[in-house]
Amino acid sequence: MENIIKYHIKNVKKGDHAAFEEIVSFYQNKVYHIVYRMVGDSHEAQDIAQEAFIRAYTNIHSFDENRKFSTWLYRIATNLSIDRLRKKKPDFHLDAEVKGTEGLDMYSQLAADQALPEEEVESMELQSYIHKEILSLPPKYRGVIVLRFLDDLSLAEIGEILDLPLGTVKTRIHRGRELLRKKLRHV
């Protein structure tokens, strides 16, 4: 698949705008999910993901074709997410109750795999709580935790995306997990 993406990139560099549409189609869900897991708001995640693709398109000539495009794109998306988190006011939480409902948040709207209703509620509450705790981590730990455990990226890929040495990635994952473990110790 990487060869097809590289082919499209070469076409984009030659001025073929439709080739970039193919790239966007292939990566849009993955980029959105990475961003969503970092910022915790679907509207903001859509905006940031769109901005990531715009930046990738406008800077496509600086992309080194000897590297993986996905890593470059995820790095752009992650950096935009971190920038947004730094500017964001900390008093807004996605886990807030949806207006017009009785105690429901957005996480309660996710589909489950035919579990019993009480199991679904417990699972949703636990997922919501864990996600809330991940969102409360400092951005430098939140980023590596999301990329490693929610997006299943390797340590090397995380280092490349965040432009960090492997040792720093390992340290941040360890410290992020410890912070998260302390927050979740009573669960």
Image: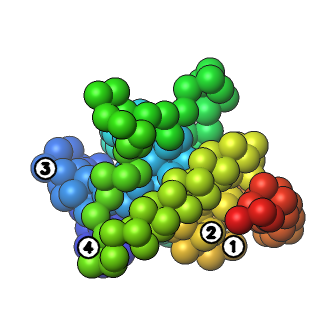
Mark 1 or 4: in front is: 1
User: Dot 4, how many residues are within 10 Å of its Cα: few (below 14), some (14-19), or many (20+)?
Assistant: few
Q: Give the percent coordinates (x, y) of residue 180.
A: 76, 59
Q: What's the residue at 48%, 67% (across, down)?
A: 123
Quadrant occupied by the N terminus: bottom left
Q: Are marks 1 and 4 in contact (CB under 8 Å)?
A: no
Q: What's the residue at 49%, 65% (across, down)?
A: 122
Q: Secondary structure at mark 2?
A: helix
> Disc 3 designates what residue?
18
Q: Secondary structure at mark 1?
A: helix
Q: Give the percent coordinates (x, y) of residue 154.
A: 62, 76
> Disc 2 designates what residue?
148
The disc, 2 or 4, on the residue closer to the chain's N-terminal end is 4
What separation in Å lies between label 2 and label 4 (alpha carbons)?
26 Å
| 108 sits to left or right of 161 | left
> Disc 1 designates what residue?
155
The disc, 3 or 4, on the residue closer to the chain's N-terminal end is 4
User: Dot 2, how many residues are within 10 Å of its Cα: few (below 14), some (14-19), or many (20+)?
Assistant: some
> Disc 4 designates what residue?
4
Mark 1 or 3: in front is: 1
Mark 2 is on which residue type?
Arg
User: Dot 3, how many residues are within 10 Å of its Cα: few (below 14), some (14-19), or many (20+)?
Assistant: few
Q: Secondary structure at mark 3?
A: helix
Q: Are marks 1 and 3 in contact (CB under 8 Å)?
A: no
The disc, 1 or 3, on the residue closer to the chain's N-terminal end is 3
Q: Are marks 1 and 2 in contact (CB under 8 Å)?
A: yes
Reply above or below: 107 against 93.
Answer: below
The disc, 2 or 3, on the residue closer to the chain's N-terminal end is 3
Q: What's the residue at 38%, 60% (across, down)?
A: 30
What separation in Å lies between label 1 and label 2 (alpha carbons)?
7 Å
Q: Secondary structure at mark 4?
A: helix
